[in-house]
Amino acid sequence: MYADVVKDAPRYPLDAVAEYEDWFKTDFMTELTKRLTIDKGKWKATPDSHKVIGVAGKLALDGCRTILLPVVNAWIEQEYPKLWQKGLDYNKLMSDMQGYPEPEPFNDDDLAQINILVTGEIATQLDHADHHRRYVERNVSSALALGWTTERFLQAMTVPAGIVGYPYGNLRYSWRTHVTRLIEGRARSTFASASESRAMAVEA
């Protein structure tokens, strides 16, 4: 049952990742480069070019908020209650096997815990999008200061799995990797949290 919650978790947010990455490589780059001074293929710093840094960050953040976050947040809101219920089903099975009393069915305490988890995770995703904004701004800043080409900028924004979402530790992870980890990790943790909540109630 624990393995199945990961295997069966819907992965449609990855479609939104693909849409965002396509938008980033096309519309975002078009909006960015038309604001630049490019001389012999290289980005040229001018007295006003620093203004592009903030514009680029805002464009990326707006793209996340329009394309990516609504789908990811919908997944969180829709799937967390289902995952929690699966954790309760697991706990009921374990109680039956061990001869413990029948656990309480889904109740207001469960709803309260789900709402807390959902609210916290949605806030975390917005924070991740803001980290992505900062990563875009840092690379635009470097590109202007060092005279990168557009291709060099895209290289800095890309890893084999796709467009970089935001660095984690010393590594750069794509949005695809971040969202995959969200789906798989939250499937496990929400399932486990529901089961643990019942176990703690019995001990209390």
Image (tube, helix red, strand yellow):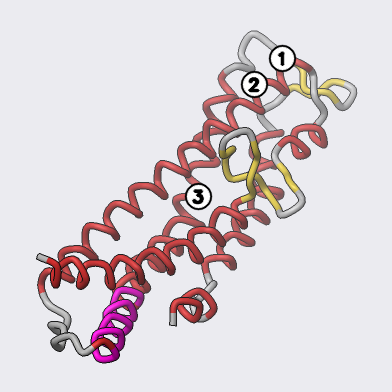
Mark 1, secondary structure of its residue: helix
In the rendered structure, find residue 141 and report the number of the disc placed on it.
2
- x and y, in percent, of residue 82 in the image: 33, 78
Image position of 135 (left or right of 85): right
Q: Residue 172: where, in percent of width, then height?
A: 65, 40
Mark 2 residue type: Ser
In depth, the one of 72 and 47 nearer the eye is: 72
Image-quadrant location for residue 83: bottom left
Task: Give the Cα separation between the discs numbered 1 and 3.
Answer: 26 Å
Is there CB contact under 8 Å for labels 2 and 1?
Answer: yes
For residue 8, the mark is: none
Estimate the spatial distance between the alpha carbons at disc 2 and disc 1, rounded to whole Å.
6 Å
Corner quadrant of residue 90: bottom left
Q: Which sits earlier in the primary sequence, circle 1 or circle 3?
A: 3
Query: x, y percentage for residue 35?
Result: 66, 29
Is the residue 157 above or below the residue 94 in the image? above
Task: Tell me if mark 1 has few (under 14), some (14-19) or many (20+) residues whose alpha carbon lies within 10 angstroms of its own.
Answer: some
How many other residues sit within 10 Å of disc 2, few (<14), some (14-19) or many (≥20)?
Answer: some
Which residue is labeled 1 in the image? 145
Q: Residue at x 40, y 46 (%)?
A: 126
Residue situated in front as seen by the camera: 94 or 123:
94
Above or below 156: residue 185: below
Q: Earlier in the sequence, mark 3 or mark 2?
A: 3
Residue with the mark numbered 3: 64
Residue drawn at the location 59% of the way across and 24% of the way down: 52
Q: Residue furthest right?
A: 40
Residue under the point 17% across and 70% down: 111
**Are dots 3 and 2 in contact, CB under 8 Å?**
no
Query: Residue, x 24% and y 85% (percent of image)?
Result: 95
Residue that lies at the very extreme toward the top in this rendered image: 47
Question: What's drawn in magenta, residue-wise?
Answer: 83-97
Secondary element type, mark 3? helix
